[in-house]
Every structure is written in structure tokens, then in C-alpha cells.
Amino acid sequence: MNQLRFGGALLCAAAVLLPAAASADHRADDHAPIGVMGDHFHAKGEWMFSYRFMSMTMQDNGIGTSDIGPDEIATTAPNPFFGTPGQPPTLRVVPIEMTMDMHMLGFMYAPSDRVTLMAMVNYLDNDMDHLTYQGGMGSNLLGGFTTRTSGWGDTRVSALFALIDRPDFRLHAIAGLSLPTGSTTEEATILTPMNMRPTVRTPYPMQLGSGSYDPITGLSVAGRKARLGWGAQWNSVFRLADNDEDYRLGHQHEISGWLSWLFSEPLSISLRLTHKDRGNLRGRDPAIMGPVQTADPERQGFERTEIGIGLNLAGQDRLAGWRLGIEWQTPIREKLDGPQLQVDSSLTVGLQKSF
Ligand SMILES: [Cu+2]
């Protein structure tokens, strides 16, 4: 009896540890690190549901590639609205920390082996802490305040077109549209340098959507040799039209490359490098004005290079079709059209189930 049990355990261990070859779609490294969207396509008739939670924290400010402290911002950074009555010459409200939590629900369906359709809705929860300096000059602090916005973000619908589909090499193109389901008119109560607490439209980074229909394009490639996997993805979101508030967000480009190592069929780890480029706003919302960097259309763009480590788990046997992924990313270089908050790190956890 004991021997039988031992034999069974050994078999299980062998199944877990056996190298690659077996069932292709149960390999942990069949999917990219969980922070990558639309990295794989499906076989005809397959469905997939996914839930991802991403939390990003930002703190301390940067300008270009250097750090800048709140006092220096409040006394030296020009206020673009200076000249408008009541606007001081420098920025007097300084963001010091932000957390962005995002819940993402994803859905994939493949009407054919060539095409996989994908839709993704997001629920956002943003928090930003600020310092307010007293009056129009000097470095006396008046106090601090936090703004918070939450709600549905923009919805993405796209199609993935399989161009090459071999077990060791896959290439597909991505084409889609971001739909303006997220609000661009969120409000919050602030503390002004004149010690008033009005409720105003929040600056751009605290809004939930772009307000425009934005085309998405991309290319995704993945390959592997034995236990070593690799992949890369490019995707861009183009902001082509002004929204109802008279501005458009900057274009967003992202390129990312990763390597993965398969320890056993259900477990792989990954290392990823990502480069993001976001442009400044065109136009501006007349309702967004104030001596704060986040209200300046010219202080929204950035370039950021991040490194990420991740873990993929793929369910076997009775858990076949289930996947769990975790990825942690942190910047290694940021170039900010600042002052802007710097990213500290982000964590993505996701659960996927295919049928
Ligand atoms: Cu999928």
C-alpha cells in the first residue's frame, strides 16, 4: 500500500517535472508575463475569461531624469496659468504620492484559428496626496489634501490576427479601438494656497478616460526552445480626435521584450524589459486650471523603462485551463516632462480560465 502511494507520488512528481513536450496549452510559458495584454491567440471555438488586478504606486517628483523636491517646485517651477487673474507665478500645489488600482476584466473568443477577439473593461481607483503652499510665494506649507476618483475606465475591443502559428514560434497582429467609457469630468475637493476648499474638476491624471475613440495597433511575437521562452510586443494607442472637453491625450507607445524559464509544465518565471513613451496633451480642458503640475497639458508626457519579474502558473489535470500570473515592475529610467510624480513600482496579479 505504502509502495503504491509512493509510486503514485513519484508519477505525479514526474508529470510535474517532465520537460516540455506534452500538451502545448498547459505550459506555464505559453502566456507572456501577466502584465502583457493580448499576448496570445486561441484555437477556433475557444473562450477565455480573465481578471487582473494592477496596483501602481508613484511618489516623489522628477523633472527630466533628475529628482526635484516639493519646496523647489513651489518656488521655481513656472505656473502655465500665470497671467490669469489670481494665478501665482509658480506651482503652489505639489502632488507627493499617488496610487492607481485597476481591476481589469477580460474576455477572449476565437471565431477561427486565424482571429481571436478580445474585450477588456477596467475599473479604476485613483488616490493622490498633495501639499499646498501658502499664498503666492515662499516655502511656507499651508497643509495637505487627498483627492480620490474611481469608476469605470475606457473599454478596449480588439482583434488578434494570427500570422504565424507554430509550436515554437507565434506571431500575431493586433488592431482595435479604445472606447470612451471612462469619465473625463471627475471632481474633487482641494485646498488652495488661499486656504479655500472648493470642489473642482480634477487634473488630467485623475480622470478615468480619454474621452475619445482611440485606435490601437500592435504586433506580438513569442517563441521557445526547450525550457527557454522569449517574446516581444509592440502596441500603440493613437489619440486622433479631441474629446468633448477640447483636448486629446498624448499618443501612447509601448514596446516590451521578455525571457522566461520553464521549471516544470505548470511553473515558469519571467524577466521583462518595457519601454513606454507617452506624449503631452493637445489642447486643454478650460475647466482644469490651477498652480499644480497635473493641470498643465505640457507636463503629462514621459519616457519610462521598466524591468519586471514574473511568475506564471498553469493548472494541470482537474485545473486544466486555469492560469495564475504575478508580475512586479519597477522603473530603471524615467524621463519626465515634469515636474511629475515618479513611479515607484507596480504589481499585477491575474487569473485566467479558458474553455
Ligand atoms: Cu486568452
Image: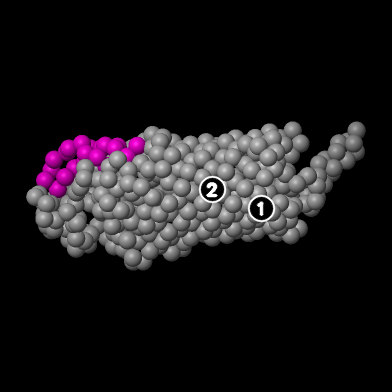
Above or below for 111 versus 87: above
Marks counted in the figure total: 2
The x, y position of residue 153, in whole percent, is: 41, 38
Q: Furthest-left residue in view?
A: 85
- Dot 2 falls on a residue whose secondary structure is strand
Q: Is residue 204 visible?
A: yes
In the rendered structure, which amino acid carries the disc numbered 1?
Leu
The x, y position of residue 84, in whole percent, is: 11, 52
Asked whether, in this view, residue 347 is left or right of residue 337, the answer is: right
The x, y position of residue 337, in whole percent, is: 32, 61
Q: Residue at x 26, y 37 (%)?
A: 187
**Residue assigned mark 1:** 163
In the picture, residue 273 is in which quadrant? Answer: bottom right
Q: Is residue 148 visible?
A: no
Give yes or no for residue 193 being in the magenta stretch: yes
Q: Of 286 and 198, which appears nearest the observer?
A: 286
Question: Sequence order check: which comes first, mark 2 or mark 1?
Answer: 1
**Residue assigned mark 2:** 175
Q: Of 5 and 127, which appears nearest the observer?
A: 127
Image quadrant where one finds the N terminus:
top right
CB under 8 Å between discs 2 and 1: no
Q: Furthest-front residue in view?
A: 241
Ligand 1 within 8 Å of the CB at mark 2: no
In this picture, which residue range is highlighted in magenta?
Answer: 183-203
Q: Residue at x 60, y 54 (%)?
A: 220
The dominant secondary structure in magenta is loop
